[in-house]
Amino acid sequence: MNTLVDFTSKLIGYFEWVMLFLVIGGGLFLVLYSRFLPYRYFKHAIGVVRGKYDDPNDPGQVSHYQALASAVAATVGLGNISGVAIAIHNGGPGVVFWMWVTAIIGMCIKFYSCSLAIMFRGNDSAGKLQGGPMYYMTKGIKTYGKPLAIFFSIAGLVGVLPAFTTNQLTETLITVVNPDESVVLLGEFQWRLIIGIALVIITSIVIFGGLKKIVKASSAIVPVMVAIYLLAAFFILGTNIDKVLPSFKLIFAEAFNFNTAVQGGLWALILLGIRRAIFSNESGVGNAPMYHGQSKTKEPVQEGLVAMLGPFIDTIIVCTITALIIIVSGVYLESESNGISLTLLAFEKSLYGFGAELLMILVIAFAISTLFTYSYYGTKCLSFLTNVKIGWYYNIIYIVSIIFAAIASLDLVINMIDLAFALMSIPNMIALLYLAPQINQSMKGYFVRLKHGET
């Protein structure tokens, strides 16, 4: 296990700077190239999600809301609860600021990528309409698109494995339930194995039902779990209202602290914030376009605006709330715990001894919704590399990996996903930058039609 951790750490060191240049540098270029137009139509994006512009005759399989809910179910999960804790544990409160910056840039990246997912849809081997990075690479770039799409899909087979989600859910259950070995005659390893097997059974029931079953489950779970999490969070922050403003001040102050405790100084702090934000909202990675590409719409820009809401919900709202809870509780200064254990301590301290149990229930809901949605990404990647019939077998690989993730170390799991996401972002960002002019042209026409009431 230690050998794998060291090996993956070295590989990340090579690829993360390429990711940094493409996601942040390329993202900033897209923000300026778009002339900030997507941000100015934020209200319109909400109207599209609400179904105001839906046309049942449009091509696609799911509504705007269902596509957003599924994509958000995949991103609003343990990355927001556990990933933020890891970031603050390793880099202090200042890392949150760089997560915000990455999320704002990421909103524009999601706009372009999910617009392209509609603009360049294609048919799979079964003749069904599909959208996603592999399709806008092959149909949009043509000559060099196929190698990029193959590279993306291979990296995606690893990047969408449920390693982090399963690992942190298992950690939560072990921490909260705290099984007594002398009573149940089972050690921690056996408990982790049992949890892994249980998750395999629950996940299998949904993912083998296909896209519509996944979407239906995600659409039902996401609003409820986010609402309960926000209510608990607002109660914690409300009872600590005097500490909220100082916490924001601390985030801004530490964001530019050259004497930060992060090894490597300010640049290491910035890179940590970028990595955790990308891990949380997946901007530039290329996962979300695979769901948004299935939306019932003929307007690429419309779906891009809907997708833009994802990083805002995920990082600007949910991650910020989690960060504030950890900071106001002070547990990041008092404990050596990392990941979900740190967030559990913050909830336990802030909710009068009942926080850990409440968070455990929420974590189960967050984790299961993510487990449902990620399988679709992997199936789509393998289907593109082979065919639809073979692609279905990714579900078997997926559920088997759940057991591995339940017993693996946190460091190995984080390194695997960070590395795969970095590799996925390279071909995806190249494609976005190459095809951006076509989205700008589409955007110009769409907003003119919107102004004249023609959409």
Image (tube, grey):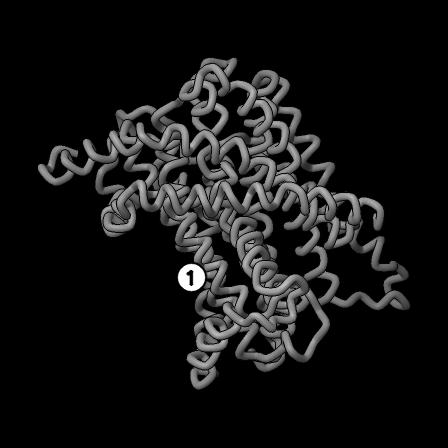
Which residue is drawn at the image coordinates 36% and 28% (left, top)? 118
Asked where in the image residue 342 lies, by quadrant, the reply is bottom right
Could one spot residue 234 in this view of the protein? Answer: yes
Vertical arrangement, residue 74 with respect to residue 210, above or below: below
Vertical arrangement, residue 368 with respect to residue 350, above or below: above
Which residue is drawn at the image coordinates 38% and 23% (left, top)? 120
Q: Name the outermost residue toward the left.
A: 452
Foreground: 313 or 150? 150
Foreground: 176 or 436? 436
Foreground: 129 or 355? 129
User: Residue 188's spot in the image, x, y percent?
Assistant: 83, 59
Q: Name the outermost residue toward the bottom.
A: 242
Give the side of residue 215 with respect to residue 165, left or right.
Answer: left
Asked where in the image residue 296 lies, by quadrant, the reply is top left
Foreground: 62 or 439? 439
User: Residue 269's spot in the image, x, y percent?
Assistant: 58, 62
User: Residue 432's spot in the image, x, y percent?
Assistant: 42, 33
Give the side of residue 205 with respect to residue 117, left or right.
Answer: right
Instruction: Report the residue marked by disc 1.
Output: 317
Indicate the amino acid at tag 1: Ile
Could one spot residue 50 in this view of the protein? Answer: no
In terms of secondary structure, where does tag 1 sit? helix
User: Residue 20's spot in the image, x, y percent?
Assistant: 54, 46
Which residue is drawn at the image coordinates 47% and 15% (left, top)? 143
